[in-house]
Amino acid sequence: MKIWSRSKKQKDEVPPALLLPDQDGVPLMTFPSKVVAPLRHMVARAARNEPFPSRLAVMSSLRQEGVTYLTHALATTMAHDMEATVCVVDLNWHWPSEMLSSVTKNGGLTAVLTNKAKLDDAIIRTGLPNLALLPAGNMVVERRSSFARSSLLKETIAQLSEKFDHLVLDIPAILACNDVIPLASLSANACLVVRQGVTSVEDAKLALDDVDHLSILGVIMNQVHLYTPSIVLQHIPQY
């Protein structure tokens, strides 16, 4: 029997950060190993007995809990680790990703839904050949709710599913937007981002109640230090 032990050098080694580059190789976002590691674990657990979901909605109870950052981190991790194509779809017209807004071309998803651009022309290719981005674009306030519930949006998401193996949907905060349930329902699977010190137990419970028709893949704890609310803990794989 051979007993394996790590050398001091191996113990001190820190896995490299993952980069999300643009087509020219310029980093758009950087994700340290401490962020990537739990996402890798979540993906691995979810894919143990069946394929990883083709669509996954990422959301939070409140605003500014880190959904957009973790959505891109998850998609980048999947693109690095899986032999599959992945697309991040920003469905948060209320508070769109600033990073995606800076690289939006042809008006993003909004332009597609308003017949001002073709879907292929709005998709942004990255420096990773199997990862793409679709920004939300600038949607006027009075049309956001109708488009969130429209058959046109459902058809557009279906078209994207034909182009990519996996869609990671960036959804607005559940308790801050009335359009979350129809937007989240574009996927049968979801995960909830919880930021320690921001999300209360009651907020987490209310959010989970609103999307209890979805299969909750897991809860991503953001900036964890000490305490995990019990209502959230039941959704976190124990290891």
Image: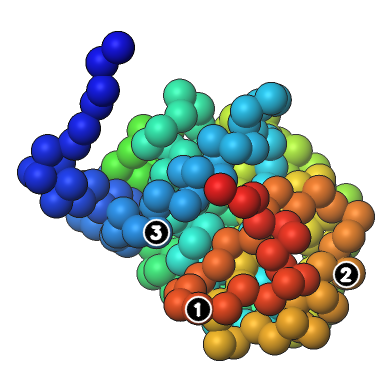
Q: Which mark is residue 226?
A: 1
Q: Label 3: which residue?
A: 35
Of all residues, the one furthest to the top in this rendering is 1
| Residue at 21% in and 32% down | 5
The N terminus lies in quadrant = top left
**Residue bearing mark 2:** 210
Q: Quadrant of residue 80?
A: top left
Task: Say if 58 sits above or below 11 in the image.
Answer: below
Where does residue 63 sit, x and y in percent of width and height?
Answer: 62, 83
Lower position in the chain sequence, tag 1 or tag 3: 3
Q: Secondary structure at mark 3?
A: helix
Q: Is residue 42 left or right of residue 232?
A: left
Depth order, front residue of 104/215: 215
Q: Is residue 22 above or below residue 182?
A: above
Q: Earlier in the sequence, mark 3 or mark 2?
A: 3
Mark 1 Cα shell of 10 Å, populated few (<14), some (14-19), many (≥20): few
Q: Is residue 105 visible?
A: no
Determine the secondary structure under disc 1.
Answer: loop
Q: Residue at x 46, y 66 (%)?
A: 69
| Amino acid at the residue labelled 3 | Val
Mark 3 vs mark 2, foreground winner is 3
